[in-house]
Amino acid sequence: MATVSDPAPPPAPAPEGHRLTGRLGVGAIVFMVVAAAAPLTVVAGTVPIGIAAGNGPGYPATYLVSAVVLAFFAVGFTAMTKHVPNAGAFYSYIGVGLGRGWGLGSALVALVSYVTVQGAVYGYIGFALGSLVESYGGPSLPWWLWTFVVLAVAGVLGFRHIELSSKVLGVLLVAEVGIVLVLDAVVVGKGGTDEGLSSAFLNPTEVLSGAPGLGLMFAIAGFIGFEATAIFRDEARDPDRTIPRATYAALAIIGVFYTVSAWAVVSAWGDSAVVAEAAADPGNMLVVTAQDYLGTAAGDVMQVLFITSLFAAVLSFHNVLSRYFFSLGNTGVVPASFGRSHPEHSSPHVASLVTTVVGAVLMAASAIAGLDPVLEVFTWLAGIASVGIVGLMLLACIAVVVFFRRTGVDRRPWQTLVAPVLGVLGLTAILVLLVENLPLLMGGSTALGIGAGVLLLVALAAGFVLAAARPSAARDLVRATRSDAAPQI
């Protein structure tokens, strides 16, 4: 007869001054993580590139494929939520499943990934904001000046209580998603071009034409941010329920939105013309589409909302990164002061300031080096982040399988074995594509591509060194592993 060993006592609650508070519901968390995915930025920037360089009119199907693979990841990720001791997201899940070395290595990879993806968006928004001001007759200023303005605003909002950020992100997200949905509806209502609405994404021949691997690579990058729901665990109303629901909701919203919007863009130009148009002017393709179907004013509004979409992404990544620093401060990985919360705002104010400083240093270095804000800062840093975060998702899937096989605390086959294994297979294929094409993401430089890969591997390996050198770091992961003791016969 099976008996279960007595669980070890849970970790002691964090002392006053080291806690985050909030009553975020599913909607608020979904707003923050979907905003991090920057839906308008993806539709305006990535979709044209995916069509031109990927699989043409079949490109919308790559979002469906990506969503399905990430759904497998989400099943195991959410099943493990109540067994994870803190809001460390990836590193906590991986550490509980695979051990402290893997967990600490994953924490360092996550820091590198979120620092670089935030830096990528900072570079892009500085360029875009400067271009917008100039187009309306404003002064011509260096991109980095605008970037530092945005850095300051994000820093102020990140210093305050999380609910302020969630309200700002909610307004911005509704606006950017709203105008794209209006465009989608009008394109569908008019039946697209004379060719009619596109059906290429349903045709396997079209989906596999061109370079479907490149298409999938661009598509998966558009989902970065949805996995960060778990980082808001301490500020969620009911984390064991809120986090899983928010994860599924965010993935469904992003997946459906991207697929429908990419299909609408293809339909707006027609299967026969869309590739040529996307290749000729990818940066302005969505604005031109809006002008054609909604009028000139809509194109102007789209340009402004593109800026707010980038800002929403910056603010979301700032919140995620500051909570990583906060969690690591409370587990002894980084200085303990990082894990202090503000007495009035209950925010990770020290970690938020650190996040602002790190972003400022990275952008200052980019400016001093004379890097192009889009072709170099954005593409290089986004390339590093894409590989890093997909790699973390893969490790998280493996950790889920190992954890439930070892502990037996949940024996549901779909949640604990089948879906995570399918996630491992899908994410492995995607990671191979990303690594093979990393030089492309890094501006075509093989040396930079190799350097980016080495950086991430060094960060992962450093976790094992840190685990050996600092036995007290992230000990909560060990306690959590022991508390879920396997059933005994």
Image (tube, rainbow, N blue to C red):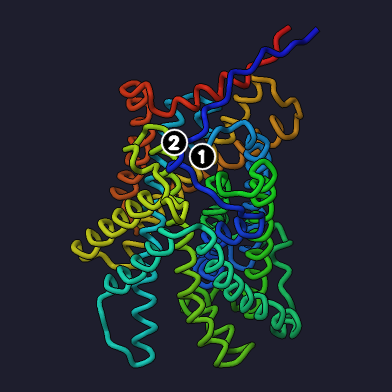
Q: Amino acid at mark 2?
A: Ser
Residue 35: x and y, percent? 54, 63
Q: Amino acid at mark 1?
A: Phe
Residue at point 52%, 69% (across, down): 168
Residue 488: x and y, percent? 70, 9
- Between 374 and 365, the residue placed more toward the observer is 365
N-term-proximal mark, 1 vs 2: 1
Q: Residue furthest left?
A: 368
Residue 285: x and y, percent? 52, 79
Label drawn at residue 90: 1
| Vertical comparison of 118 with 285: above or below | above
Given contact means CB atoms under 8 Å apart, are the residues at marks 1 and 2 in contact?
Answer: yes
Q: For numbered disc 2, what is the local secondary structure? A: helix
The N terminus, quarter of image: top right
Residue at point 38%, 77% (across, down): 129
The C terminus, quarter of image: top right
Q: For numbered disc 1, what is the local secondary structure? A: helix
- Between 157 and 192, the residue placed more toward the observer is 157
Residue tagged 2:
106
Location of residue 450 (image quadrant)? top left
Label drawn at residue 135: none
Does 150 sit left or right of 215 as displayed?
Answer: left
Residue at point 65%, 21% (across, down): 405
Q: Residue furthest right?
A: 1
Residue at point 46%, 31% (across, down): 103
Residue 318: x and y, percent? 42, 57
Does 436 sit left or right of 28 as displayed?
Answer: left
Dot 1, crowdedness within 10 Å: few (<14), some or many (≥20)?
many
Tag count:
2
| Vertical comparison of 196 with 365: above or below | below
Location of residue 182 (image quadrant)? bottom right
Could one spot residue 150 in this view of the protein? yes
